[in-house]
């Protein structure tokens, strides 16, 4: 009799609920779980049902291939404005589409306009098994950007993203789902024109850009796609997008200052100590943040009575010292009778429900929690009123965290997709969680924003949200989540901030210095130099790490941070003006360098520079390359360098575009110090025609009086005529009177050289240019002085700490092994572990790792984390970058008792698609008194793999006895021994990626296999037998990894 397929699962899909099955005759096992044996017999009724759907009204363009696929060109209608088109698979699909949550007004997406224009590019569609595939082919040479909050490279060709909001602590460049979802791509055509495409669906959506110049969306049927353009520039596309999804909220001016955070400042006294130190050390700062430990037992809307007994008094003290206070609120409400918020929510029936109608309960920080269903207007109103009352404690801003929503103790890290949201009809009505998952954070942020407005209509709310969707910018700023204190994450932070801006969210920034791990002084200083020029500027770090305040890394780093933040505060008049235009017109704030010349393909992949309005910021993100070694690629045209007499190797280079005027303020300590009558500086760079222009927006810095005309928008112009540059006011807007203040004009000449003049703002001021010879001398002298200042700076010491727990002070760099398919990073100094397994063709990072834990580890006994995983290993041999030779490294760690654990990691010759690990426990000096045999040892291979898509991942293998196994996340921890161990191969399959990580091994060396599922991770362990070893009888396990595609 044939062996059975063994399926270990409990609730993998909504339609099946199967518990663990013993090995039984295959007669009793459904072919549902034998797809490789009966593939042609799967789902015949489902396929027939899908094909029988009405496929009318395709304008003659639909075709049916076989019996299960419909495809064709999408039909279109113009919406919003000329150049914007909505595409659907059919008229029926158009009428059946769910309301748009991303659009400010869903009706504007559904209402056609009269237009003579037709689309330049028409998407095609294919519908199969409830999945709608949309493909848009563009000219060869097109570059892709956007896709929302994504890690990795700036230009997205070759990448694939899955929109599914995910708690992604410690993400890497290959992570495909982060905290926010933006099913949006910005395409730059070869001629410099730009086109945007939005898949208007809240469901999980695959954005596939792996094929050159081709955009593909895959999501459950049906959904419309919206194209914007082609327009003349990427800025024009973003302006058009903003008319659909809305512009960023107008931030209060104080929120553009520096903000200091930590998980957590554990008492009000510690908060006051930190803020006093900022003022004593003259380091500018505007905001201090309170993480979850201010609460009473993590109960939202409460305060710890011992450590934060009087929040009103605390905030009063902070305000007196020029600080605002922002406090965290999570969605998880502790399930506890007598807790006012929980009791109120239950009374008002506000919780997300399970499929059976009972409130869903999931573990988060307080323990068991219930979760508000923000898809209902009554729930958003309930939450807003809680926020309104909370604000009365002196709260200046609110931080919404964990709102993907994140859930502990489940492999998916979120709530079940079968949960029920009783949503408003205008959002989509009653739907399961898979429909509303990606907008849960947006709706929470919206409710929080509205609560803050209820509390005080004369102040602008400031909300920061971790999770978001297209349109979140209307209510909240965002940050790039739980990043790492590494140079790689510093580099990625630039592209991540820019991608958010290219996706409609201009107010974002990273945790400066990195959230997880210990930054080195140089890394922190360099990151502050760059981060001080991001739209949102906040330092943040997690528990158990060393202090990450600017003064925590030595005097040299402290001075660099001081200089960097002084730069930011001098530029706040510019940044605030940029946000006014972003709010009122939809223009971006920070953009990639190629925005200066979209036609130039050489600029499209620059990742260490960006534009802040007309200011080009050029930074080094490499540890050993400071400003003095930086080679800047400038766009065509005039770009004049400048600084604030603050040149330093760890600060970025600054250039002003010719034809620009930017306003500069005083180097204040916080925004509240500034007065309208303060001296104003205009920095001027003339273009090739001898002209320049720029704007300055001024208002109260808070509130909404600016919407009633109470502001001043000044358009300054400069013009060169007969060796005289005249700077004057061209025109103004708003009812504000011009403050009586001194105006300082600085005219850039090149090489940092300037000419100055002073007068009163509003007057026409003139700068007389000297002869060309005199100008050349000034430029030469300035460049010479610049080099001298750069040489004489006191540099931050080059001391690299391991990014690990507090106290780690090992100075080293990972060994990198690389071939055409794989990039591996090995850290000999802690367990010889592999911390990175990056598969290049798929762009997938398979390991879940920090330097000091997880990744690929090996132990020397059956005990978890026994000797071998944390010792320092010696590098016995290393062969790197030898043409035609395999790269390899051999490591050896002393595990005590005369034993060593030896490991060779290498790429076999003529097999670029795999890498091999040969490991052994060897007896080196076992005493004669023991007969030459060691203690009992077991070689235990322990890799921790990250699950990018937990609900779509499982382990598959055929055991030695021929039985077929599929092991799903619900299985927890399972051992396989004897004839049930894999027959030399098992696979970690990710159905979303369409990939499998294959682990092959020598069955004769493996005694036992273990699968252990955890929160977003899985371990696939190989165990040798447990026995003593001698010099003649070591323990060995040889195995290899390969990535293969799956059907």
Image (tube, grey):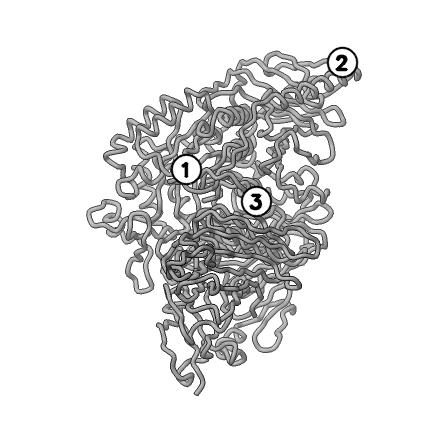
Residue at the spot 61% in from the left edge and 77% down from the top edge: 66
Q: Which mark is residue 499?
A: 3
Residue 73, above or below 505: below
Query: In x, y percent, where is residue 359?
Result: 29, 57
SS under mark 1: loop
Residue 922 seen by the camera = yes
Residue 873, above or below 992: above
Residue at the spot 48% in from the left edge and 24% down from the top edge: 555
Describe residue 5's horizontal placement relative to residue 663 as left or right: left
Of circles 2 and 1, which is in front? 1
Q: Which mark is residue 770?
A: 2
SS under mark 2: loop
Query: In x, y percent, where is residue 932?
Result: 42, 61
Among the two numbered marks 1 and 3 on one chain, the one whose residue lies closer to the N terminus = 3
Query: In x, y percent, where is residue 1002?
Result: 51, 69
Describe residue 157's horizontal placement relative to residue 814 as left or right: right
Query: In x, y percent, where is residue 639?
Result: 70, 29
Q: Which mark is residue 807?
A: 1
Q: Are marks 1 and 3 in contact (CB under 8 Å)?
A: no
Residue 459, above or below 495: above
Q: Are marks 2 and 1 in contact (CB under 8 Å)?
A: no
Among the two numbered marks 2 and 3 on one chain, the one whose residue lies closer to the N terminus = 3
Describe residue 595's horizontal placement relative to residue 703 as left or right: right
Describe residue 944's horizontal placement relative to residue 114 as left or right: left
Of circles 1 and 3, which is in front? 1
Which image quadrant for residue 21? bottom left
């Amino acid at each position: 009799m044939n062996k059975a397929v063994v399926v270990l699962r409990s609730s993998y899909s909504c339609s099946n609920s199967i518990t663990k099955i013993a090995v039984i005759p295959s007669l009793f096992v459904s072919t549902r779980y034998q797809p490789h044996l009966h593939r042609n017999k799967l789902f015949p009724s489902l396929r027939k049902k899908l094909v029988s759907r009405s496929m009318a009204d395709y304008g003659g363009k639909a075709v049916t291939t076989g019996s299960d696929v419909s495809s064709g060109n999408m039909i279109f209608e113009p919406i919003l404005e000329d150049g914007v088109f909505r595409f659907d698979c059919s008229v029926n699909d158009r009428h059946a589409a769910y309301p748009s949550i991303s659009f400010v007004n869903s009706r504007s997406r559904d209402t056609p306009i009269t237009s003579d224009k037709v689309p330049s590019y028409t998407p095609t569609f294919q519908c199969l098994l409830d999945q709608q595939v949309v493909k848009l082919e563009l000219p060869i040479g097109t570059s892709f950007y956007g896709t929302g909050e994504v890690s990795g490279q700036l230009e997205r060709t070759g990448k694939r993203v899955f929109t599914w909001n995910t708690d992604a602590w410690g993400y890497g460049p290959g992570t495909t789902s982060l905290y926010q979802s933006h099913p949006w791509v910005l395409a730059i055509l070869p001629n410099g024109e730009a086109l945007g495409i939005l898949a208007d669906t809240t469901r999980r959506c695959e954005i596939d850009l792996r094929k050159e110049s081709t955009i593909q969306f895959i999501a459950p049927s049906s959904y419309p796609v919206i194209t914007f353009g082609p327009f003349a520039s990427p800025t024009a596309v973003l302006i058009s997008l903003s008319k659909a999804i809305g512009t960023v909220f107008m931030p209060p001016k104080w929120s553009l200052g520096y903000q200091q955070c930590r998980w957590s400042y554990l008492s009000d006294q510690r908060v006051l100590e930190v803020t006093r130190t900022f003022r004593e050390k003259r380091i500018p700062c505007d905001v201090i943040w309170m993480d979850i430990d201010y609460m009473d037992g993590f109960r939202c809307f409460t305060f710890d009575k011992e450590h934060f007994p009087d929040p009103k008094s605390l905030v009063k003290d902070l305000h007196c010292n020029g600080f605002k206070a922002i406090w965290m609120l999570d969605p998880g409400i502790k399930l506890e009778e007598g807790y006012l918020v929980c009791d109120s929510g239950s009374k008002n029936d506000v919780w997300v429900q399970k499929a059976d109608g009972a409130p869903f309960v999931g573990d988060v920080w307080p323990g068991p929690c219930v979760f508000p269903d923000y898809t209902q207007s009554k729930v958003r109103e309930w939450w807003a009123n809680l926020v309104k009352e909370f604000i009365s404690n002196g709260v200046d801003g609110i931080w919404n965290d964990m709102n993907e929503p994140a859930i502990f103790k489940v492999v998916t890290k979120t709530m079940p997709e079968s949960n029920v949201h009783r949503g408003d009809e205008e959002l989509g009505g009653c739907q399961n969680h898979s429909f509303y998952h990606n907008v849960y954070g947006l709706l929470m942020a919206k409710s929080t924003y509205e609560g803050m407005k209820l509390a005080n209509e004369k102040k602008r709310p400031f909300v920061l949200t971790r999770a978001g969707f297209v349109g979140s910018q209307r209510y909240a700023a965002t940050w790039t989540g739980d990043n790492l204190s590494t140079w790689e994450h510093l580099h990625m932070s630039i592209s991540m901030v820019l991608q958010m801006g290219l996706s409609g969210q201009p107010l974002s920034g990273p945790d400066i210095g990195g959230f997880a791990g210990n930054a080195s002084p140089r890394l922190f200083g360099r990151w502050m130099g760059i981060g001080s020029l991001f739209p949102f500027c906040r330092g943040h770090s997690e528990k158990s790490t060393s202090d990450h305040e600017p003064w925590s890394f030595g005097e040299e780093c402290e001075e660099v941070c001081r200089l960097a933040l002084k730069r930011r505060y001098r530029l706040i008049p510019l940044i605030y003006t940029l946000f006014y235009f972003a709010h009122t017109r939809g223009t971006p704030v920070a953009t990639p360098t190629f925005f200066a010349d979209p036609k130039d393909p050489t600029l499209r992949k620059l990742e260490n520079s960006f534009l802040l309005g007309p200011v080009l910021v050029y930074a080094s993100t490499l540890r050993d390359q400071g400003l003095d070694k930086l080679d800047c690629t400038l766009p065509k045209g005039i770009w004049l360098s400048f600084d604030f007499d603050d040149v330093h190797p760890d600060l970025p280079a600054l250039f002003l575009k010719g034809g620009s005027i930017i306003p500069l303020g005083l180097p204040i300590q916080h925004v509240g110090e500034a007065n309208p009558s303060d001296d104003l500086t205009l920095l001027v760079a003339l273009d090739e025609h001898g002209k320049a222009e720029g704007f300055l927006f001024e208002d109260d810095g808070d509130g909404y009086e600016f919407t009633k005309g109470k502001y001043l928008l000044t358009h300054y112009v400069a013009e060169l005529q007969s060796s005289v540059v005249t700077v004057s006011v061209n025109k103004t807007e708003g009812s504000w009177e011009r403050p009586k203040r001194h105006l300082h004009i600085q005219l850039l000449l090149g090489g940092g050289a300037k000419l100055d003049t002073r007068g009163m703002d509003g007057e026409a001021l003139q700068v007389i240019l000297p002869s060309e010879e005199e100008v050349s001398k000034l430029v030469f002298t300035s460049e010479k002085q610049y080099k001298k200042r750069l040489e004489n700076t006191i540099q931050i010491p080059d001391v690299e700490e391991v990014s690990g727990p507090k106290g780690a002070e090992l100075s080293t760099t990972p060994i990198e092994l690389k071939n055409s398919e794989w990039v591996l990073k090995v850290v000999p100094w802690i367990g010889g572990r592999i911390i990175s397994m990056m598969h290049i063709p798929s762009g997938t990072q398979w390991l879940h790792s920090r330097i000091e834990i997880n990744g690929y580890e090996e132990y020397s006994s059956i005990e978890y984390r026994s000797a071998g995983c944390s010792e320092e290993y010696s590098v016995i041999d290393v062969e790197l970058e030898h043409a035609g030779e395999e790269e390899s490294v051999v490591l050896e760690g002393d595990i005590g008792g005369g034993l060593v654990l030896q490991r060779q990691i290498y790429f076999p010759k003529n097999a670029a698609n795999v890498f091999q690990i040969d490991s052994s426990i060897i007896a080196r000096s076992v005493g004669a008194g023991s007969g030459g045999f060691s203690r009992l040892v077991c070689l235990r291979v322990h890799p921790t793999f990250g699950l990018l898509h937990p609900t779509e991942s499982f382990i598959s293998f055929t055991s030695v006895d021929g039985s077929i196994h599929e092991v799903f996340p619900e299985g927890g921890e399972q051992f396989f021994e004897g004839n049930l161990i894999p027959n030399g191969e098992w696979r970690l399959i990710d159905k979303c990626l369409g990939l499998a990580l294959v682990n092959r091994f020598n069955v004769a060396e493996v005694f036992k296999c273990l699968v252990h599922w955890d929160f977003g991770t899985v371990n696939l362990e190989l165990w040798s037998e447990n026995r003593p070893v001698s010099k003649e009888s070591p323990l060995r396990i040889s195995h290899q990894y390969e990535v293969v595609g799956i059907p």
